[in-house]
Amino acid sequence: MPTRCELASLVEERLLQRNQLCEAFFAREAGRLAVACREMSERFLRGGRLLAFGRGPYATDAQHVSVEFVHPVIVGKRALPALDLSILFRPWMESILRPEDIVMGFGPPEGDVEVWATLQEAYQAGAMTFALPGSEGSYAVGAETQDAFIHQEMTEMLYHTLWETVHVFFEHRELGHELGDTAFLYPFLGQEKQETGDLLAEVATSIQMKVHDDSNLRARLAAEQAEQIGETARAIRERLQRDERKEHALDPVGGDEAHQRHRVLALRFGHQPQRAATAERREDLLEGHVERQWCELQRRSADRTGRLPVLP
């Protein structure tokens, strides 16, 4: 177990490592990202949607980016259509994909062949594709690091950049747009409509400026709060280990599945049987919701093409 000082040093080192990787990556990719955002804005204006998916922990990136576009955090930004298709991404993509759509596939640093195959099918159907990571598609980029945690953080920064920059291109299609208190986010925006072709270099510069601001904040955290972050991480780890020991006390093979699930929920919620029952009910509702969604997709696909997609 590392000492408090050793843990603080490790936190500081890891934070500063992220700075080096992020600045190098976005300095190289800023121009490509600006071009990609311009195309995304054009596709959204034609009625396109963002369709995102990933497997395992990378499904959380699909969930996150979908919420980012559907529910903008800055007042006045338009909500844009986005869906997370991770649960059954290949058959759902076959059922609902349109040529004007934008498709993002997420995976680990080494990539995911199933994600790549689905992205390739979407690209061939005319969609704009993002392989994160990958080597083929409208925008494809390899992982900057094999560290899964840093890789995920950089991917998250990338799609936050996409969300912000897409709105810059929307705003430049409007005359006399007043930015008000958010003007500091986009210092290059004026009051007159500009051609987006002239905007690409300024957008790329703005992306790099924001990444540099992130690096300054991270360096400040490393200098001022590394010890506090380390101790917080230690406390979280100890709490998780306690919960793990409780679950290991269960017989992993005895009893039927429903009984085991009930026991796990009872342990998790202690003397709160109502919450345990609600959690169990929520799991059942989720399974039912997924089944109903699949049936609806089958019906729509049959209405449109006369055939049903095969459930893998």
Image: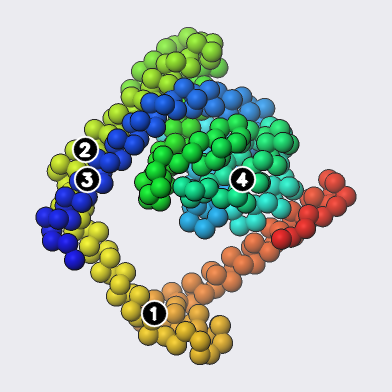
Give whichever of discs 4 and 1 has the lower sequence position: 4
Q: Amino acid at mark 2?
A: Ala
**Residue tagged by mark 1?**
247
Give whichever of discs 2 and 4 has the lower sequence position: 4
Residue positioned 60% across, 50% down in the render: 113
**Residue tagged by mark 2?**
219
Residue positioned 67% across, 27% down in the render: 46
Q: Secondary structure at mark 1?
A: helix
**Residue tagged by mark 4?**
116
Badge 4 density bin: few <14, some 14–19, many ≥20, Cα 10 Å: many
Between circles 2 and 3, the one closer to the viewer is: 3
Question: In the rendered image of this protein, does residue 94 appear above or below residue 78?
Answer: below
Give whichever of discs 1 and 3 has the lower sequence position: 3
Badge 3 density bin: few <14, some 14–19, many ≥20, Cα 10 Å: some
Q: Quadrant of residue 7?
A: bottom left
Q: Secondary structure at mark 2?
A: helix
Give whichever of discs 4 and 3 has the lower sequence position: 3
Residue 178 showing in the rendered view = no
Question: In the rendered image of this protein, does residue 297 appear above or below residue 19?
Answer: below
| 245 displayed left or right of 307 | left
